[in-house]
């Protein structure tokens, strides 16, 4: 296989790149993994985790793309994505005819369409591939890829091997932008579920019920959810170590609310949840914690209501 590039080794990217190495998609002398990250220490950490693998660290995103026929990108925010993509030494600067760019971030649909057009203008090909899943699934290859754009990129054997190494499922939705639409539907539902779950746990505790016992009850009925089983015990301990930072969850929910308004869809339940996440994001500490930390803003609002009454 040819060299594979990976741009962005943050919470998600480090696990995804690690899977390309552990599953032998890249990392051999003939097919190294070529990486770049805004903070170079992340690249060195990856090399230390896989000392037996061939990993090339480049000074710029442009050099990664120039060195590889296929480059994956996973950056945390729309601002970071645009800066890295369009910068003088960024991703786009390295695109020439035949290059494949696969962007796995969750952005606005307009961002994906702009990036696709820019890549195609330079005779490259673009696949949007936002993922459903967080830090844990990224490290064990259990992500779900929601793809759209170039079908020939999606069907390429090396791309398919990469997606299978990093994920448990890949879905192709057609024209560019539809992968992002699918991701926003999924993440807005997830955020709304988390907000409702947090309110229910807060209510249970406020009326004297044992939170742990209520988690047991919830886990035995039709409303059971892997997310509730995973997050619930941690929430009761106030452990919000970030797997999916709250500020990123809110970003996705706001994009989904905007998409619903544009489509003329009734979305008031999700809008209410988005407002809770917006309030939590105003707290700088909560913003960087896991999205389960919305539970803390629910507790705070409940305490304030009690004082006022």
Image (tube, rainbow, N blue to C red):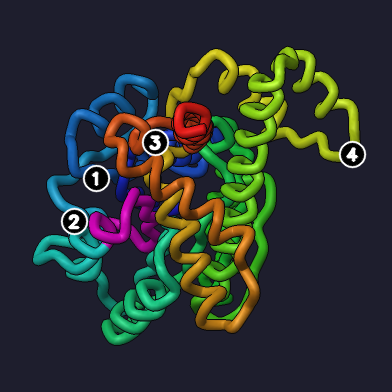
Mark 4 neighbour class, 10 Å CA radius: few under 14, some 14 to 19, many 20 or more: few
* Element carrying mark 2: helix
Q: Is residue 210 above or below residue 1?
A: above
What is the CA distance from the residue labelled 2 to the residue labelled 4? 51 Å
For the point 52% across and 77% down, the residue is: 261
The reply to whether dot 1 and dot 2 touch (C-beta < 8 Å) is yes
> Which of 250 and 54 lies nearest the eye of the viewer?
250
Q: Which residue is mark 2?
A: 63
Q: Which residue is mark 4?
A: 222
What is the CA distance from the residue labelled 4 to the residue labelled 1? 45 Å
Q: Which residue is mark 3?
A: 11
Tell me the magenta residue range: 66-81
The reply to whether dot 1 and dot 3 touch (C-beta < 8 Å) is no
* Element carrying mark 3: loop
Q: Position of residue 54 (x, y in %)?
A: 34, 33
Q: Which residue is mark 1?
A: 36
Q: Position of residue 213 (x, y in %)?
A: 78, 14
Q: Earlier in the sequence, mark 2 or mark 4?
A: 2
Mark 3 neighbour class, 10 Å CA radius: few under 14, some 14 to 19, many 20 or more: many
Circle on res. 121: none
For the point 44% across and 23% down, the residue is: 241
For the point 37% across and 21% down, the residue is: 49
Q: Earlier in the sequence, mark 1 or mark 2?
A: 1
Question: Magenta includes 69?
Answer: yes
Q: Earlier in the sequence, mark 1 or mark 3?
A: 3
What is the CA distance from the residue labelled 1 to the residue labelled 2? 9 Å
> Which of 72 and 258 lies nearest the eye of the viewer?
258
């Amino acid at each position: 296989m040819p060299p594979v590039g990976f741009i962005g080794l943050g919470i998600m990217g480090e696990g995804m790149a690690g899977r390309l190495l552990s599953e032998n998609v890249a990392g051999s002398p003939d097919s190294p993994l070529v990486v770049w990250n805004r903070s170079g220490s992340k690249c060195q950490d990856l090399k230390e985790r896989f000392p037996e693998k061939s990993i090339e660290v480049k000074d710029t995103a442009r050099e990664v793309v120039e060195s590889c026929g296929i480059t994956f990108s996973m950056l945390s925010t729309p601002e970071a994505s645009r800066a890295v993509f369009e910068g003088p030494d960024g991703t786009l600067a390295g695109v020439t005819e035949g290059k494949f760019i696969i962007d796995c971030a969750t952005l606005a649909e307009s961002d994906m369409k702009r990036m696709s057009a820019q890549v195609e203008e330079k005779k490259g090909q673009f696949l949007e591939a936002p993922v459903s899943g967080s830090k844990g699934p990224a490290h064990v290859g259990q992500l779900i890829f929601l793809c759209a754009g170039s079908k020939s990129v999606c069907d390429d054997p090396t791309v398919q091997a990469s997606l299978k190494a990093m994920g448990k499922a890949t879905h192709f939705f057609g024209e560019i932008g539809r992968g992002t639409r699918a991701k926003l539907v999924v993440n807005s539902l997830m955020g709304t579920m988390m907000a409702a779950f947090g309110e229910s746990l807060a209510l249970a505790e406020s009326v004297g019920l044992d939170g742990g016992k209520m988690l047991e009850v919830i886990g035995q009925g039709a409303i059971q959810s892997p997310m509730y089983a995973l997050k619930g015990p941690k929430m009761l301990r106030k452990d919000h170590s970030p797997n999916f930072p709250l500020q990123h969850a809110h970003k996705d929910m706001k994009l989904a609310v905007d998409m619903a308004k544009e489509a003329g869809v009734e979305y008031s339940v999700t809008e209410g949840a988005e407002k809770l996440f917006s309030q939590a994001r105003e707290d700088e500490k909560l913003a960087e914690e896991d999205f389960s930390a919305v539970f803390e803003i629910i507790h705070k609002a409940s305490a304030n209501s009690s004082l006022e009454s």
